[in-house]
Image (cartoon, rainbow, N blue to C red):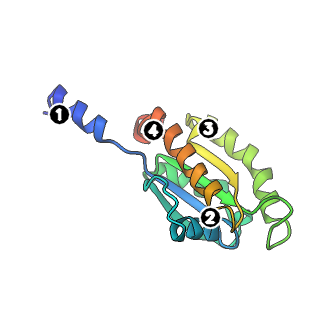
Amino acid sequence: MATTAETKTQDEQWEPRILAFCCNWCSYAGADLAGTSRIQYPTNVRIMRVNCTGRIDVDFILAALEKGADGVLVSGCHPGDCHYTSGNLKLRARWALLEEALKQAGVDPRRVRLQWASASEAQAFADGVRIIVDQVRKLGPMKEAWK
């Protein structure tokens, strides 16, 4: 059985795991630009490239949280600049459903973040990663949040 000192050490070492769904045409390119420009942001994020944020279903986000992510970032093209015309607007409409689904699951909505970042906005992408990592770090591990 772990002692209190060992448990405290494990809690102090905990770092949130964030899954980022990034639009192929804008945010993924922005993340790439952040890397090539050597813009520093937390390494807690794992990026999953999707063709369009309009293809992201609420179930994908809930599944990510259920399977071990402590938070989810969704980053896409600015409204009106979607490569597929209106995909990001479809996601924005689903966002209200997501917030309700999170409440029903007993998950704090601050564990998910929606942001718009174009291919040239590497700093905006990096700032969004910092924000979600800081928010989730304050909330603690996801495994303790499920009801």
- When the figure is inspected, residue 68 is found, relative to residue 5, above or below; the finding is below
Cα separation between marks 2 and 3: 19 Å
Identify which residue, 68 or 115, lies in the foreground. Answer: 115
In this picture, residue 76 sits left or right of residue 143: right
Please tell me which residue is depicted at 24% across the width and 30% down the height of the picture.
8
As drawn, which residue projects farthest toward the top?
Answer: 4
The amino acid at mark 1 is: Glu
Please tell me which residue is depicted at 85% across the width and 70% down the height of the picture.
85
Q: How many marks?
A: 4
The amino acid at mark 4 is: Arg
Q: At numbered mark 4, what does the secondary structure look like: helix, strand or loop?
A: helix
**Viewer-nearest of labels 2 and 3?**
2
In this picture, residue 106 sits left or right of residue 93: left
Q: Position of residue 94 (x, y in %)?
A: 75, 51
Q: Which residue is mark 1?
A: 6
**Viewer-nearest of labels 1 and 4?**
4
The circle on residue 109 is 3
Q: Which residue is mark 2?
A: 22
